[in-house]
Amino acid sequence: MSGLSPRLDRAALYAVLDRYLSALDAHDPAQVAWAGDGARDVFHTENNVALVPGDGLWATITGRGRTIFVFAILRRGRSVCSRR
């Protein structure tokens, strides 16, 4: 994750997640900072299968549900979303 600090606050983590979800909606992983240049440093999996950003859900998503739960895990510098 070049250019991203491991000590992001809650608002910054939510902003990263918002950018990710917007890029996912657009089917364009290049809109995410960590996926822009071939994503050599990204480990991306779906259903326990390693993929490059742009494969899997990136190509097949047709929309997101209305109910999304968002969590920021400050100690680990991660943000997570889940649909109920």
Image: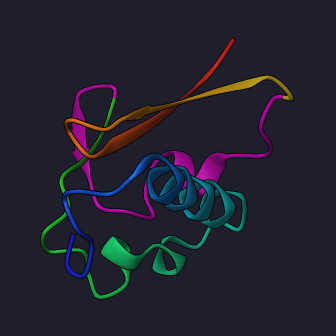
Outermost residue, front side = 9
Q: Is residue 80 magenta?
A: no
Taking depth in this image into account, of 71 and 26 the one nearest to the observer is: 71
* Nearer to us in this view, 49 or 41: 41
The percent position of residue 69, horizontal first and vertical second, equals: 65, 24
The residue at 68%/46% (across/down) is 61
Main SS category, magenta section:
loop
Q: Quadrant of the image for the C terminus?
A: top right
| Point 44% across, 52% down: residue | 13
Look at 43% across and 57% down and name the residue there: 55
Quadrant in which the N terminus appears? bottom left
Farthest residue in the top direction? 84
Q: Quadrant of residue 78?
A: top left
Is residue 81 shown above or below 82? below
Instruction: Name the residue rendered at 49%, 71% in the picture.
Output: 29
Q: Is residue 58 above or below residue 45?
A: below
**Residue 38 appears left or right of 28:** left
> Within the image, what quadrant is residue 46 found in?
top left
Viewer-proximal residue, 16 or 40?
A: 16
Q: Position of residue 6 (x, y in %)?
A: 19, 58
Residue 64: image x %, image y %? 77, 37
Image position of 29 (left or right of 35): right
Region rendered in magenta: 47-65
* Position of 63 relative to 2 (above/below): above
Q: Relative to residue 21, is residue 63 drawn left or right? A: right
Residue 51 location (% of width, % of height)? 28, 52
**Does residue 56 lie above or below 68 as drawn?**
below
